[in-house]
């Protein structure tokens, strides 16, 4: 009885992120074959994150897309892209989220290095990484910064997280919106561990 109920929970979890039952991984099967309370918690966490009152559905799905790109999960990337397009995103916005994620991966590595080493020589040098997409983003500066913050949090770059959070506050973003975006990134990453 528990296994069937838990498998239904696992399938509902997959459906919430645009995946089908065929994406039911060995790990999800393992959890659904026991009385795994965590599986129910994860479904609630993901569903609540995607339905945040501080993010539109389109924004939540685009953040999901950035997490899937960052974590190199191609099936989830395709699912979130489809969901975002269904909520009104266009191809340029999808491409910008993918580009933003790629740029932030480079920035996160570079700035983590500078932060870890803490030598004036490195911190005094210009980054030398072109970032022209940040100048006039299709999705607007506020949402571009929000995606940048989520990716930076996922990649553990303290300097980038602080910088993007500060920029968001200057844009008038509420701390609740920031928290919901980062929480969504966190719970989606925890889902990817099980896919």
Image (tube, rainbow, N blue to C red):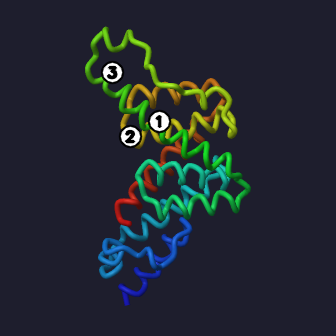
Residue 173 placement, left or right of 185: right
Distance, label 3 to label 2, CA atoms, is 15 Å
Q: Secondary structure at mark 3?
A: helix
Residue 126 placement, left or right of 136: left
Name the mark on residue 155.
2
Q: Secondary structure at mark 2?
A: loop
Q: Which circle's residue, 2 or 1, is located before the other in the chain?
A: 1
Task: Determine whether label 3 and label 2 are within 8 Å by CB.
Answer: no
Task: Determine whether label 2 and label 1 are within 8 Å by CB.
Answer: yes
Mark 2: few, some, or many residues within 10 Å (few <14, many ≥20)?
some
Quarter of image, res 83 = bottom right
Question: Which quadrant holds the C terminus?
Answer: bottom left
Q: Does 6 sit above or below residue 165?
A: below
Mark 3: few, some, or many residues within 10 Å (few <14, many ≥20)?
some
Residue at x 41% of width, y 54% of height:
72
The percent position of residue 49, horizontal first and vertical second, equals 54, 55
Residue at x 41% of width, y 61% of height:
191
Residue identified by numbered label 1: 104
Distance, label 2 to label 1, CA atoms, is 9 Å
Residue identified by numbered label 3: 114
Q: Which circle's residue, 3 or 2, is located before the other in the chain?
A: 3
The percent position of residue 166, horizontal first and vertical second, equals 54, 25
Residue 184 placement, left or right of 96: left
Mark 1: few, some, or many residues within 10 Å (few <14, many ≥20)?
many
The percent position of residue 2, horizontal first and vertical second, equals 36, 85
Residue 154 placement, left or right of 48: left
Residue sitting at the far bottom: 1
The percent position of residue 112, horizontal first and vertical second, equals 34, 28
Q: Does 65 sit above or below residue 166?
A: below
Q: Which circle's residue, 1 or 3, is located before the other in the chain?
A: 1
């Amino acid at each position: 009885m528990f296994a069937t109920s838990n498998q239904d929970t696992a399938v509902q979890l997959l459906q919430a992120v645009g995946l089908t039952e065929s994406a039911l991984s060995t790990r999800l099967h393992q959890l659904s074959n026991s009385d795994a309370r965590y599986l129910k918690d994860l479904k609630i966490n993901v569903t609540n994150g995607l339905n945040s009152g501080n993010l539109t559905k389109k924004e939540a799905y685009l953040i999901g897309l950035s997490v899937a790109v960052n974590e190199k999960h191609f099936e989830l990337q395709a699912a979130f892209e489809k969901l975002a397009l269904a909520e009104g995103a266009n191809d340029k916005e999808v491409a910008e989220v993918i580009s933003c994620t790629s740029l932030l991966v480079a920035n996160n590595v570079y700035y983590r290095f500078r932060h870890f080493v803490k030598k004036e020589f490195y911190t005094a040098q210009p980054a030398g990484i072109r970032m022209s997409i940040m100048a006039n983003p299709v999705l607007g500066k506020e949402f571009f910064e929000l995606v940048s913050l989520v990716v930076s949090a996922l990649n553990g770059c303290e300097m980038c997280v602080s910088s993007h959070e500060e920029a968001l506050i200057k844009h008038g973003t509420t701390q609740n919106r920031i928290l919901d975006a980062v929480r969504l990134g966190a719970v989606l990453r925890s889902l990817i561990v099980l896919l």
